[in-house]
Image (cartoon, rainbow, N blue to C red):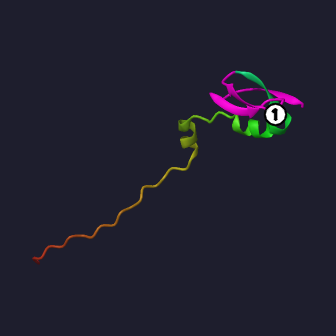
Amino acid sequence: MPASKRTVLLRSVFYRDADGAARRGRAGQEIDVHEDDVARFDSLNVLQSAPAAAASEQAPVKPATRKTARRTSDSEE
């Protein structure tokens, strides 16, 4: 069966090899992915961006305002 060469970006990822057998690839390893599994492999073999960069792209969160009852004194002046 035809296969496509790919490089593993993640620390560890499961994939099907050219013969259809389940395999595990390690970071930096060049592997042959089964042609029917290439799209799935490519969608999973993606490094996430740094959390700080993702947080800076989000809209700032406005703190919730808390309403409190005002205390009134019992004595009137």
Judging depth in this view, the residue of 49 and 12 nearest the camera is 12
Residue 58, compared with residue 76, is above or below; it is above
Judging depth in this view, the residue of 56 and 35 nearest the camera is 35
Q: Give the residue displayed 71% in from the left and 21% down from the top.
A: 29
Judging depth in this view, the residue of 10 and 23 nearest the camera is 23
Q: Which residue is mark 1?
A: 20
Residue 50: image location, x then y, percent: 57, 34
Q: The C terminus is located in which quarter?
A: bottom left
Whether residue 17 appears in magenta in the rendering, the answer is: yes
Residue interval drawn in magenta: 1-28
Horizontal relation, residue 47 to residue 5: left or right: left
Q: Give the residue displayed 34% in from the left and 66% down from the top.
A: 67
Tag count in the figure?
Answer: 1
Q: Classify mark 1: helix, strand or loop.
A: loop
Three-letter amino acid code of the residue under disc 1: Gly
Q: Residues within 10 Å of mark 1 (few under 14, many from 20)?
A: some
Whether residue 46 appears in magenta in the rendering, the answer is: no
Residue 16: name its quadrant: top right
Residue 43: image location, x then y, percent: 73, 39
